[in-house]
Amino acid sequence: MKTHYKFNRLELAGSLGDLGTLLPLAIGMIMINGLSPSGLFFTIGLFYIFSGLYYGVTVPVQPMKVIGAYAIATGMSASQITASGALIALFLLVIGGSGVITIIGKYTPKAVVRGVQVSTGTLLMAQGVKFMAGTSKFQVLQQTAEPYLTVQSIGPLPIGIVIGIIGGILTLLLLDNRKLPAGLLVVLGGLGLGLAFGTHQGFDKLRLGIYIPEILPFGIPTAADFTLALLILVLPQIPMTLGNAVIANADLSREYFGEDSKRVTYRALCISMGLVNLFSFFVGGIPLCHGAGGLAAHYRFGARTAGSNLMIGAIFLILAISLGMHVLAVVYLVPMSVLGVLLIFAGSQLALTIIDMRERKDLFVVLVMLGITLASNLAIGFVLGIAIAYALKSEKLTV
């Protein structure tokens, strides 16, 4: 009988594969929006563990990107962000519990699912390049490419480019190496660089202890907070969540794990995301989802069982409970360019799902969705992709 849990180097390497998506948004929302580091890391750890235990396969945990990116860019308050988490939790629980999501998933064309996956993969790769070049929003706000390294260049080359090239070459050489997994080597190498050449910001405040997240650390959001969160954060996030975190994620899970992923249904994904976002609301954390890009990252770097969820979940929980509000001191050790390497390979893995598209009309839908996403956002790409796919069912239209 196939085991649902393995605890080895490959699973550990795979568990670290999505840090490139998770950490930058988490750090940004803690530093810029004032979210609770303790509550955020605690929630992520719990979500990883309970997802692994319930689904029995590798399941991703990611920040909701529309909410995260907009909140960071505009400096929204912590109360407004937690309000968005509560609202989207309610929405997901309703459509998951009622079964409406099953109908939405049933009538979403496969070409649209591939369009979501290719678009997400392309965005991840582009973000990875930005991390190495030092041009991401977070790095621009910090006014330096590697905010937590004392060395910023080697000769004429920025340090991020050097680390990125070396990390990329090592990843290509070791991507399928079972004895020395690429993801594990790249992350551990990054931690080593941080220890040797980092600014060690926050190390002077580190105190080991037992820290439990505070309940409602920002109080109960006001009616104005809920209204603003609904209009600015939740409504733009919903189409992306349905397309990427539910439909595309369930499709990819079936592709990777077959019958083992039978619990990864549209309804279950909605309900698990709804429950965790309700919990996150109470502890001042970040709105979370199951992004398809995260699954591609975990799988590409070696994760094949739910053991990867338990390992990365335990890491986040231990950091949250033992370090509390000072957990970022450890996170700062990983250079941004190392996260960029992880993003590029995760994005390429997700974008390669397009290889099973054979019909010109299907490929047209995928490519138009990619163009719309790059010009606007994935939520609009998903909605218009469905409209285009159904329009192209007419024999009168050709591409």
Image (spheres, rainbow, N blue to C red):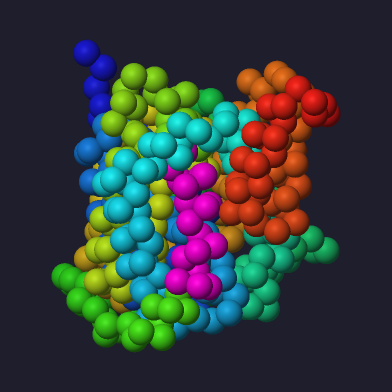
Q: Which quarter of the rendering shows the C terminus?
A: top right
Depth check: give the residue in front, 41 or 360: 360
In the figure, 294 relative to 29: above or below?
above
Q: Which quarter of the rendering shows the N terminus?
A: top left
Q: Seen in the image, is 261 located left or right of residue 178?
A: left
The segment highlighted magenta reads: 230-247
Horizontal and vertical percent for residue 338?
A: 58, 53
Horizontal and vertical percent for residue 68?
A: 50, 66
Horizontal and vertical percent for residue 391?
A: 70, 35
Horizontal and vertical percent for residue 62?
A: 44, 53
Q: Seen in the image, is 25 located left or right of residue 257?
A: right
Does the rendering let one see residue 303? yes
Q: Seen in the image, is 212 located left or right of residue 20?
A: left
Q: Which residue corresponds to the image point at 70% horizontal and 43% vertical from the top-left?
A: 369
Q: Main secondary structure of the magenta part?
A: helix
Tag count: 0
